[in-house]
Amino acid sequence: MTKQRKQNPYASRATAPGEVPGGTVQYGETASPVPPVTMALLERGRTEYHVFCAPCHAETGDGHGMIVQRGFPAPPPLAMSSPAASRPQFLYDVITGGRGVMYGFAQRIEPGDRWAVVAYVHALQRSQHMVLADLTPEQRAAP
């Protein structure tokens, strides 16, 4: 039953050279360079993280997001990831293609925004292990 002959009325028309036939989805992207980390990039990453990642990974990255509280399998905490898993390209690839029960976000998050999420996740990981001595006097005085 899983392999039945089907006819797609939209795919039956002739296509011009280089045109994608109807009924198919073409996906591909060029390599996206790693952007420099700026405050604007981190803000964009924070926004995208809260929209796409926080439902499972939670706002703190501990893996106890709202979806997990409703019975979905918990992802590993982002702060406890292995050294190999914290490489920027690895995180970018996981966001792009998914891993385990996580589906890929390639068609939901633009490549530049994926790099922004990677930068935010690194900042989130670093914040989990921050101690007061790591902050400058100006940072300690900030609200």
Image: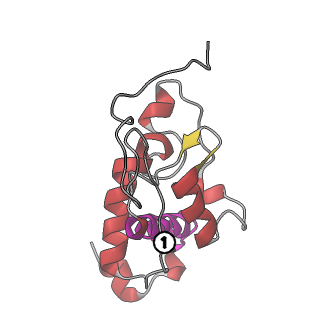
Does the magenta portion include 127? yes
Residue at the spot 34% in from the left edge and 49% down from the top edge: 51
Magenta range: 112-131
**Disc 1 target residue:** 30
Q: Can you say which quadrant of the picture contains the C terminus?
A: bottom left
Tag 1: amino acid = Thr
Residue 63 image-quadrant placement: top right
| Residue furthest to the top | 1
Main SS of the magenta part reads helix
Would residue 104 be counted in the magenta stretch?
no
Residue 131, above or below 93: below
Q: Is residue 99 left or right of residue 34?
A: right
Residue closest to the eye, 52 or 15:
15
How many numbered tags mark residues here? 1
Residue 100 x, y percent position in the rendering: 65, 41
Tell me the residue at 37%/72% (across/down): 42
